[in-house]
Amino acid sequence: MTAPAATGGRGKAAVWIGLAVAALIVVGFATRAEPEAALVPYSPESTDPSGAKAVAELVRSFDATIDVGDEQPPSRGQVAFGLGYVVPDDEAAVARWRSWVRDGGTLVLTEEVAGLTPELGASGGFGSPDDQSLVVEAGTCDVEALAPVQRLSLPYARYRWDVPSGVRSCFGDGDEALVTVEEVGDGQIVSVASPEVFVNRSLDEADNAVLATQLLVPEDGTTVAWLEYPLDAGEAPGSGILGVLNPGVAVALWQLVIAFVVYAVVRARRLGAPIAEPLPTQIAGSELTEAVGRMLRQTRDPQRAAVVLRADLVAQLARGYGVDPSDPSVLAEVVAARSGVDRDRLLAVIAGPPVTDDASLVALADAISSLRQEVLHGART
């Protein structure tokens, strides 16, 4: 029997509708998806609230050039900007950076680096973790270049610097400050105690943009070496196989995956009336029993038939009473205790002596039939 034509038509229509929906979903994701760089924290190409595209565009507006890389120290650039970047604090790396600064470079850091930034102050930061926006006044400030910067706005600042002797500072009380400037030869190391001052969500608040301009673009046409923010393996938005594919290829693969899932779901859920399937030929139970009996009779081996009958009974008892069938004595003990049947009688039936003639086989079959009625009645099957 086959399914009605209308049912098949509805099934095909559902498949095409499902595929169309999948295609629309993929197109929607593709059109709204941002490039991977737009999600990287502190990246000069990131439009995420924690990104730094805004400060990068601000720097470029002064005809400055931004070189993004991980060269330490950079071979090009008058200013090196480590936004959220942790410079290796081994002695050799610190010595290389101090030599680069001594030759006239400006190193701007926002994370603690032993040997380059001051130590963290003992009194902690500004505000509390519950603050959404914190405004910090300039306070004691002896950094001439930062005179135009009167206020900074940022979320809770976790810490501030302990100002060493001979180091100038701003946005503090002279002993601890948010910004410090250490003169080293012809250059300087600027330490800002929070990268949040420079990110997209904060740059247009208070005088944050003025601070960024004064530090990163001391004069028009400056080359800024932007130190790459180090991503952990779990952070990288482009990690894995899909990360190395062309975006168009990745979208096409996702489209195929979604289309396959939708197609599988639609095909798995049959629509319309049930379809009657042809069944195999039914054999009456009596005919099957007679056929098995004739086969066993032809073998002229009563013991083999007895083994079959006993194995069938043991299997039924084991299922019905939840007992391991491998040990007949344990099986007989459990079944007898639960059913009230004599244990020795039961054990003689399931594990008795070999059957050597037809009369003994008939007697065994009768005993098995009797026990099946007594023991299996009401047991779990």
Image (cartoon, rainbow, N blue to C red):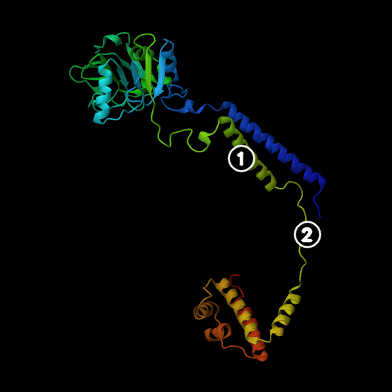
- State the residue in front, 376 or 60: 60
Which residue: 35% across, 9% down?
Answer: 219
Which residue: 65% across, 91% down?
Answer: 357
Q: Position of residue 294 (x, y in %)?
A: 73, 82
Residue holding disc 2: 278
75 is higher (above) or lower (below) than 343? above
Q: Name the quarter where the N terminus is drawn.
A: bottom right
Furthest residue toward left: 165
Q: Amino acid type of disc 2?
A: Pro
245 is higher (above) or lower (below) than 169? below
Q: Secondary structure at mark 2?
A: loop
Q: Residues within 10 Å of mark 2 (few under 14, many from 20)?
A: few
Q: Name the quarter where the C terminus is drawn.
A: bottom right
Query: Left of 277 or right of it: where is 97?
Result: left
Q: How far is the residue under mark 2 from the one under mark 1?
A: 35 Å
Q: Position of residue 23 (x, y in %)?
A: 65, 33
Asked if residue 275 can be seen in this view, the reply is: yes
Q: Position of residue 267 (x, y in %)?
A: 69, 46
Residue holding disc 1: 257
Q: Residue 380's quadrant in the figure?
A: bottom right
